[in-house]
Image (spheres, rainbow, N blue to C red):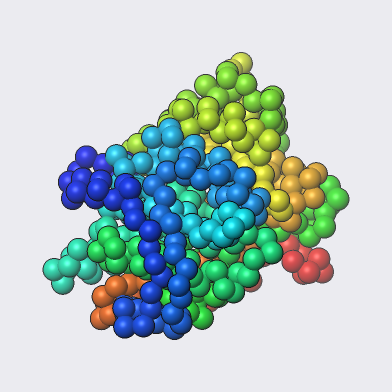
Amino acid sequence: MPRAGRSFGRFRRLNEFVQAPELAGRTGARARGGGWGKLTAVTETAKVVARIAELDAAAWDACAAGDPFCSHAFLYALEETDCATIKHGWLAQHLVFEDERGIVAAAPAYLKMHSYGEYVFDWGWADAYRRVGREYYPKIQACVPFTPATGPRLLVRPGADAARWQPLLCEALIELARHHDASSVHVTFPRREEWERGGELGLIQRAAIQFHWPNRGYRSFDDFLAALLGRKKRVLLRERREAAAATIETLRGDDIRAAHWDAFWSFYRDTTGRKWGQAYLTRAFFEQIGRTMKDRLVLMLASDDRPIAGALNFLGPDALYGRYWGAIGEHPFLHFELCYYRAIELAIELGLARVEAGAQGEHKLARGYLPVETHSLHWIADPQLGRAIADFVRRERTAVRAEIAEIAAQSPYRADRGC
């Protein structure tokens, strides 16, 4: 999958918005478009910031509630190491509301000229725009680039009234879209309460599926194994025995050294080259987070006579997030060992509630990962296309929930364990 940039000529004219103006929230007659118009008039003003570096890290992180990906350090690394930049089709337009104490509410947001790196697919919507002679890009994306992990997207400082500020963030995103003459607004992988609040406001609510491992209070990996059906347990143990031919280390913090990043970069490049054609992330990105987020990183590294595979995880307040995997050569079951089983062991050790192993992958079910519903919110400027998309999403959401129920009926857990 190519990185965006040179082929999107129209994006060049949007450079003028790098220094974006403040946006006054407005509703009433201007609050038109697909699925919108239930807010009352407000007077607060949202500031638009084109670089996360311009914002106070501590104030931003207070609103991000410990989420590793929405943290100032992660977003800064993406911007400063040439990953999520205007050259590649990501123009930062972060929204911030401030009071006398600083940032009270915020949303990580980008003006985009493509749909790469989002994991909530709207290519069909873009095609529908094209077929009626309209332009789908640019659009506004409120998200963490290249990261299909649920987390805060409508950030509110602890103690502030989320019921007040989150609707204002939604309204500011729509005003930002109008300012740029954008087709739409997309809030991807928000927390469920944000998704429900957006639905109350009239935004289009989309659902999808991921597979997460739930910690049912296990005291050890053997305790987890005891909860599995016998045949599932036997397969899992066989896969672990096959993977045991490699030496595996779990590295955290300062234990992850430059040589480990060199090895992991080679894995990442090899895997992305085979699957997608080009990597979204740069070598400098991994170096940067290795310095600024080392306490949140866990690297599972497999070696033979040299490093052969690795899985990079991020620690959240109550979850372990598996994000990047790579290997040199073919190594049976090593992917399952590093990405799934070692993650489960660590989550049990740390008392975390779940493991999120990224997008896709019904094969995760046999490894103890269960289907869960993930979410996104959408606003479409064109009323007619907005109604058509809203109707499609309603039917899609019904199908997604039916699929989750069907997959869950094939649970690998014993019925007497209540899983």
- Residue 76: x percent and y percent? 49, 39
**Would residue 402 be found to the left or right of residue 379 on screen?**
right
Q: Work out whether residue 263 or residue 100 is closer to the camera in this orientation and state it.
A: 100
Extreme residue in the right direction: 219
- Residue 253: x percent and y percent? 69, 30
Residue visible at 43% across and 39% down in the picture: 79
Residue visible at 62% across and 40% down in the picture: 313
- Considering the image in quadrants, where does the C terminus appear? bottom right
Extreme residue in the left direction: 133
Q: Work out whether residue 410 or residue 213 is closer to the camera in this orientation and state it.
A: 213
- Considering the image in quadrants, where does the N terminus appear? top left
Image height of 63 relative to 71, above or below: below
Image height of 311 relative to 415, above or below: above
- The quadrant holding residue 138 is bottom left
Give the total number of marks visible in the rendering: 0
Image height of 352 relative to 411, above or below: above
Q: Work out whether residue 185 or residue 371 is closer to the camera in this orientation and state it.
A: 185
- Residue 182: x percent and y percent? 27, 63
Image height of 28 relative to 181, above or below: below
Q: Work out whether residue 223 or residue 139 is closer to the camera in this orientation and state it.
A: 139
Residue visible at 47% across and 42% down in the picture: 54
Extreme residue in the front direction: 100
**Residue 331 appears in the rendering:** no
- The quadrant holding residue 216 is bottom right
- Residue 378: x percent and y percent? 40, 70
Residue visible at 48% across and 57% down in the picture: 96
**Residue 178 appears in the rendering:** yes
- The quadrant holding residue 409 is bottom right
